[in-house]
Image (cartoon, rainbow, N blue to C red):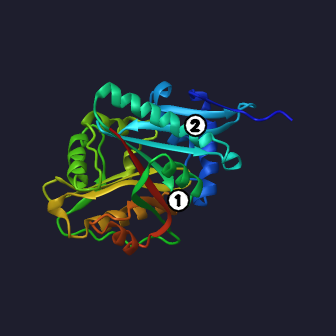
Amino acid sequence: MEKTTYRLRRPTMDDAQAVCDLVAACDTEDLGAPDIVLADVLDMWSGFDLDKQVWVVEDTESKLTGYAFLEEDSEEKLFSYGCVRPSVRGRGIGSMLVEALESHAAELRRESGVPKRLQSMIPTLCGDAVRLFESRGFAPVRYFKRMGIRLDAEPAPANFPDGFTVGPYVKGADERAVYEAYIESFADHWDFAEPSFEKWVEKTQLPTFNEQWWMIARDSEGSVAGFALARMRDDLLFIEKIGVRRPFRGRGLALALLHTVFAASYRAGQPLVSLGVDAANPSGAYRLYEKAGMKPEHEISIYEKTLS
């Protein structure tokens, strides 16, 4: 019987569905359920150079067995993700991918002359991945919880403080104000990398973007006080960012925004709502989501290695 060999290569857009299926199989094994749809891959790849930032591994029958990508969060921070099909783990595929990530990170360090921190996201309970990264000098630096809620009945109306209103994002008018509110709201979060305005606006230009799921809270003068930025998928509504500007904190705006999102999702026929939260966030976000009825589903670890 011929021994199976594996080849590292760059993907093409024709690989998008196969990559989605591969990541879904890994999610099912490591997290209990798939956490990706094809639109997620297409959105991500629209901002990537596939010849420099993305890798796949295939076997002798051209079936994809591994996948990884690397993006530059800031001048000194690189973020990556990778996965290996559960049925072929332990055969060196993960090592191939991590070597590719480290090699590209080292190249970026040489080109820029700036030390790089290479981060990678792995399921906390995936022992194979933990052992691989620790063997290569990575160490855990942060943990994130995925939280979710199933809305079995229509949620109670959101209770906004007096003088505040909520409405959908207005494309072509709200870009700058929401961007500035985002920067202010997240500036004190762990390892926050401030995106350029141009990079931020790219989110609103993706084919899957729908402004009805970006909900903006405003004060009596119409200024942006807070926001909940979500994206509807086939399987759930995912809240990507929720934040309140410093002058407006402590008034219940974040909880009211959550309830607004819940109600809108329920009315749209989607009872599942999910988000990710930094388990060590000092703002009390985890407790806020628990108060709203959300429950932890799984945990993700961020591992990091410095290339100096």
Q: Is residue 223 left or right of residue 52?
A: left
Q: Residues within 10 Å of mark 1 (few under 14, many from 20)?
A: few
* Position in image of residue 26 (x %, y %): 61, 50
> Taking 242 as reference, is 87 above or below it?
above
User: Image quadrant for the C terminus?
Assistant: top left
- Camera sees residue 299: yes
Of residues 65 and 247, the one drawn nearer to the viewer in this rendering? 65
> Taking 210 as reference, is 280 above or below it?
below
What residue would you read off at disc 1? 269
* Position in image of residue 250 (x %, y %): 20, 70
* Position in image of residue 100 (x %, y %): 51, 33
Q: Is residue 197 left or right of residue 40?
A: left
User: Image quadrant for the N terminus?
Assistant: top right
What residue would you read off at disc 2? 96
- Camera sees residue 47: no
Of residues 6 and 85, the one drawn nearer to the viewer in this rendering? 6
Q: Residue furthest right?
A: 1
Q: Quadrant of residue 48?
A: top left
Q: Residue at x 64, y 56 (%)?
A: 29
Q: Secondary structure at mark 2?
A: helix
> Taking 274 as reference, is 45 above or below it?
above
- The disc at residue 15 is none
> Which sits earlier in the primary sequence, circle 1 or circle 2?
2
Q: Secondary structure at mark 1?
A: loop
